[in-house]
Amino acid sequence: MNFIRFFSKILAKPFYRYLIKPTKEPLEIQKVLLAKILKINQNTTFGKAHKFNQISSIKKFQEFLLPHSYEYFRPYIDKMTRGEKDILIPGNPLYWGKTAGSTGAPKLIPITARSIKNAIRGTLLIYLSYIAENPREHSKFLDGTVCFFNANPVIEYMNGIPVGFGTGVFNQSSQTQFWSPIYRKMTYSTGHLFRIKNIQQRYEQLVREITQRDIRVFSGVTTVVLGLLEIILKYIQEKNPNIKCIKDLFPNYQFSILGGESPKFYEPRLFSVIGERIDYREVYGATEEIIGVQLQDSPGLTPLLTANFLEFLPLNSTERLLIHEVKKQVEYKLLITNFNGLYTYMLGDVVKFISTDPPLFIFSHREGTINMASEKMTVQQISEALTLTNEEHNCSIMEYCVIGKYTPKPHYIFILEFLPHQTPQKEREYLQSLNQNLMICNPVYREQLIGIRAMNEPILWIVRKGTFSELEQQNLERGLPMGQHKIQHLSINEKILQKFEDYIQKVVRLN
């Protein structure tokens, strides 16, 4: 037993109780946080334009700042990327976080030192809560190594400021903290492997390095962790067929912290490759900020009330509710205000509370996207890919629906109704082109499909003429109101597939 584990067994419970205090008085904590954000940023260009110095209450804040998407902030961020200071935040950001572009073009998010501390605090809360549940048994992972599958920390530089993906930025910043020698001793991360451009060589190096360690925790985006564990196992089995599962390689593996998408959809596949069930906790966040963490074995995310000032919009209302006003089992659009220069920012996520005392929520869905493996594919991206493919193959479609399936691996099913006499002559080549165009429109999808191999190729269902019209008419006859009778363009509701089964003319696959 090393000294870190020894002290964690003693101190985990009291330290955890101290860090979790903000959930006891959520509204007071949120008031203090908002006042601090406004004071720190009142002399920025944005703060002056929105009269931060005149805001003395939450009510005033809601009057002065309306909810906005990223496009409202883009002109300010463009100034910052050109080197201008004190625009959204004092000075310059520590990093630029690059997103997958779930609402169109990729976004750049300013990341400050406070945001890094919030991410560290959230991760620490998860570890402490896990150890506190059973100090003797749950602290055992501290005698081994934590493996963090992080994204590329530095893609490029803008005016000397590094630009990277969220998990990569978090890991990179962790290397520069005062406690970084302990962090490096306890963890193995994969950021350095991105210097190897050949993907197969990168995997080979990963396997060489990781199999020399006593890994007890695998952490990262759910699909990345799962995909890389499958790749590691495959490489090892080629040399040693007696290795049947990850537990044969890492017998002390006991715990994971997973984010990006809900691990519950991947449990059968995850536990199958591991060889048995292991404990895991979920972290919910985005490049914009960490938002919630799972602090118990049962479902439910605790909001990090010291990281974001949170507001909640009911789906059919413009009323902005606060943390003490939400109700159980009601879906809300999420608004965040934080130290990264985002104010009443519409994240695009929908959440639902399963408890209000203490506040616990679950992620419901992201508006206008389909997110099978962190790719966050949008209607816009799919529409663009279909348009390019139809032009290449001289085709036209009447209507479409895309359904995401999680088994056997995440993949899309494209249900297309073509116009008469404008169907593809070579359906498989059409599907190949569509897949290529999807990868062009969404680079993260390409990485998940080819790089990480977290997804399978799409499947095409060609349905007969009039299919969508008939199904929509059936919905109207069932009593659905106008506006809700149309078939969704994007969904993970596999029951929708059953509606189309009787209308299929042909199923096309790439493998």
Image: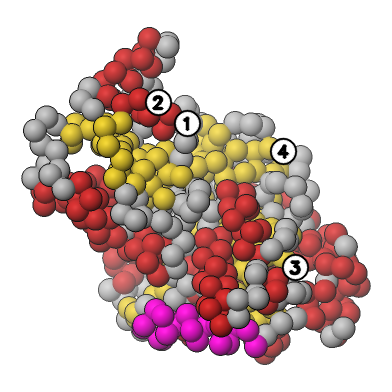
The magenta segment is 194-212
Q: Residue at x 63, y 35 (%)?
A: 326
| Amino acid type, residue under disc 3 in the picture | Gln
Question: What label sits on residue 254 in the rendered view?
Answer: 3
Query: How many angstroms separate mark 1 from mark 4 (CA)?
Result: 28 Å
Task: Looking at the image, tell me whether mark 2 or mark 3 is earlier in sequence order.
Answer: 3
- Residue ID at (35%, 40%): 402
Q: Is residue 120 left or right of residue 192?
A: right
Q: CA distance from mark 4 to mark 2?
A: 35 Å
- Disc sitting over residue 499 in the figure: 2
Q: Circle 4 sits on which residue?
A: 355
Q: Quadrant of residue 183?
A: bottom right
**Of labels 1 and 4, the one closer to you:** 1
- Return the residue nearer the eye: 331 or 144: 144
| Three-letter residue code for mark 1 | Lys
The crowding category of the residue bearing disc 1, from other C-alpha atoms within 10 Å (few below 14, some 14 to 19, many at least 20), is few
Give the structural element (helix, strand or loop) at label 2.
helix
**Rendered location of residue 423, percent (x, y):** 14, 38
Q: Is residue 496 above or below residue 32?
A: above
Q: Earlier in the sequence, mark 4 or mark 2?
A: 4
* Viewer-proximal residue among 202 and 35: 202
Work out whether mark 1 precedes mark 3 in sequence or the reverse, and give the earlier one.
Answer: 3
Q: Which mark is residue 347?
A: none
- Give the structural element (helix, strand or loop) at label 4: strand
Q: Secondary structure at mark 3?
A: loop
